[in-house]
Image (cartoon, rainbow, N blue to C red):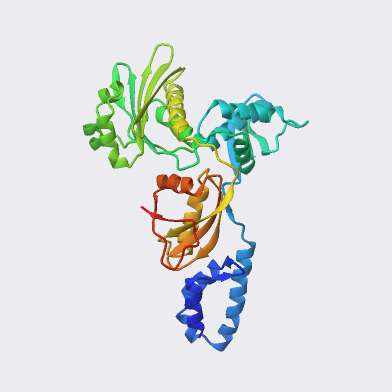
Amino acid sequence: MVASRLRACKERCVVYGQPLPWLWYFGTLVEQPIMTMSLHLRTRYPVAVLLGLALLLLAPQAVAQDTLVTKVAAEDEAAALEQGLEQALVRLAGLRSEPVLDRVDALMAERDDDGWIAALQRLREVEEGVYRLEFDSFRLRTVLRDAGVPAVLGERPGLLVWAVLDRDGQRELLGDAVEGRGVLSALEALAAERDTPLLFPLGDLQDRRAVQPSDIVGGVTEPLLEAARRYQADGVILLHVRETVSGAEARSVAVHDGRDFRSSASAADAGAAARAAVAQGLDQVAGRLARVAAEPEWVRLGFVGVPDYAAFQRLRTELVRLQAVEAARLDSLMADRVILQVRTGLETDDLADLLRGSGFGRTDPPDDLDAAAVWLGRS
């Protein structure tokens, strides 16, 4: 009797319309041993079930990251707030654009008597001239959405950076083995600030055989795209940095989705010039991907190939990282599939198309279920 009930629970555990993942998972683990439990242990089983139910009811639903942290160098708190706010909005939007900068100006104009804004949770000077700021990311996303600011709502493309540094009459192919006068560290910092994946080649023998510095300098993309296949990148950035008497110059060609995006910049050193040129290219790539989210609503998405609660947790974490998903909560968890309620500002079909960038493809609904608006699986 107990085993049959556990098997039924394993197929679909729902009480008052809410799933019981802990109960399902607990049942999976103890289905066999429970038949030989002593009477004393069996009397404790309902207590474990009630404890699992209590944990479920008390656990918060998954929402996108609540706190967004930035760190800036500034003269005072007012300047730190403006710089940190710009950095936070650019990270959320996925690009630096005029609409984003307009929101920075608007929020700074709305500061209270203490010089704070509603989205600011904490501001403190961690060392002389360096400030750490914590923002409520939900409030900032709402600001962007309500103002109709285009943002990259889906998975941000991972671009592989092929970089060459010209100095002292020599050209160096940069990678793990050759950092190049702060160029790669500057780009790593940019990627972290933008929450945008930038990939860097190993610079090993295989790379050096496949890639010629002259191709990068000349903007010849075909061999570089072919060489990038080993890194499974979504596109490439060709970066040529040249040191000059007065500093450094950088030229960048970002290649994504069959399009080239060119940019250039000058700065006092090679790292700063590379960062500025690549940042412009990323803005151009993101500009084509950015969309305006509508007022969010709850939609039901079904996913196949989710064998257990741990896999569901990983899936939910992956979804709430997307700017298009404000929150995700469990609707139903079954043997190898799950239905999630997802709060999003996109239409269901648009969200499903966006999720293709994260590796999900449409699939036919299970024969016994049609409760979800669309069913998806790993493609």
Using residue 31 as the reference point, say whether residue 363 is left or right of it.
left
Q: Residue furthest right?
A: 113
How many marks do you count on the picture? 0
58 up-or-down from 223: above or below: below
Q: Residue furthest top?
A: 245
219 up-or-down from 298: above or below: above
Q: Is residue 204 visible?
A: no
Residue 141 screen position, x and y as percent: 60, 40
Which residue: 40% across, 61% down?
305
Q: Is residue 271 visible?
A: yes
> Which residue occupies the foreground of this view, 78 or 166?
78
149 up-or-down from 310: above or below: above
Residue 316 screen position, x and y as percent: 50, 54
Tell me the quarter of the picture where residue 263 sits. top left
Which residue: 59% across, 67% down?
17
Tell me the quarter of the picture where residue 55 sits. bottom right
> Which residue occupies the foreground of this view, 122 or 349?
349
Tell me the quarter of the picture where residue 303 sits. bottom left
Q: Residue furthest bottom?
A: 39
Residue 329 screen position, x and y as percent: 56, 57
Which residue: 42% across, 61% down?
365
Residue 28 screen position, x and y as percent: 47, 73
Which residue: 52% across, 58% down?
340
